[in-house]
Amino acid sequence: MAEVYSLDQFIQDLRAITNQTDDEHKIIGQVEPLAKRFAVDKSWLTEKHRGTDPEQGFGVHLLHEEPDHSLAVFAVSWMPGRGAPPHDHGTWAVVAGVEGVERNTIYKRLDDRSRPDYAELEIKHDSSIDSGELISMKSGGIHSVVNESDGLTISLHIYGRHLNYTGRSQYSLDTNEKKDFVVSVE
């Protein structure tokens, strides 16, 4: 039987990685196997992590955040048929599937970024992540998420900084509007 991978050990390992380098590529490469291990372990997962906010379509549950808002870890529960619009994170991100499948659409930005409230996006590719599967992005990466199933899905999210402290944005594919993206966190 595999040894339980506790939240405390996971955070200790994440701190060791992020204290060694600022290189996002190196950080992501080292965080990915740990995120997979922690997501699959599920010993940390409780009933409260299944809670959702019907208004936003998902629940964001803080598992850890450093005092300076860096190194944030969340469990996110996605309501059936709901998701998040195209958005960036303002930091590096590693997302691991815990329960159910979530579809991620990755976008490429086409405009020259000269207009602060405007962004043209084009779909780059789609991918679905199931339990133990990963999607990772460097700062500036843009994606959307949707739970296309009839049941709740849960994913583990690890970020270089708490999402509500990065100045991240959400994007409209219909109007090309870019605006702030702040989420409700439990």
Image (tube, rainbow, N blue to C red):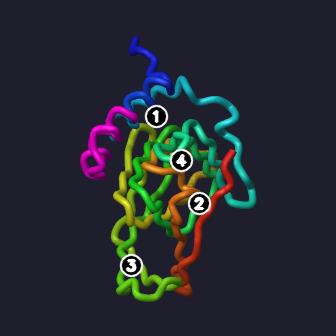
174 lies left or right of 132: right
What count of labels does the image hold? 4
Separation of marks 4 and 3 at Cα, in angstroms: 31 Å
* Residue type pointed to by label 1: Ala
Query: With respect to residue 143, does 45 lie above or below?
Result: above
User: Mark number for residue 83?
Assistant: 2
Q: What is the magenta segment's predominant secondary structure?
A: helix
Secondary structure of residue under mark 2: strand
Mark closer to the observer (4, 3): 4
Separation of marks 3 and 2 at Cα, in angstroms: 19 Å
Q: Residue at x 57, y 76 (%)?
A: 179
The residue at the far right in this view is 54
Q: Earlier in the sequence, mark 4 or mark 1?
A: 1
Query: With respect to residue 148, does 26 lie above or below?
Result: above
Q: Earlier in the sequence, mark 1 or mark 2?
A: 1
The residue at which mark 3 appears reads as 122
Separation of marks 3 and 1 at Cα, in angstroms: 30 Å
Q: Residue at x 48, y 46 (%)?
A: 70
Judging depth in this view, the residue of 128 and 65 nearest the camera is 65
Q: Image quadrant for the N terminus? A: top left
Q: Earlier in the sequence, mark 3 or mark 1?
A: 1
Which stretch did the figure color magenta? Answer: 15-30
Q: Position of residue 126 (x, y in %)?
A: 39, 63
> Is the residue under label 2 in contact with that under label 1 (CB below 8 Å)?
no
The residue at which mark 1 appears reads as 39
71 lies left or right of 78: left
Q: Position of residue 154 (x, y in %)?
A: 56, 43
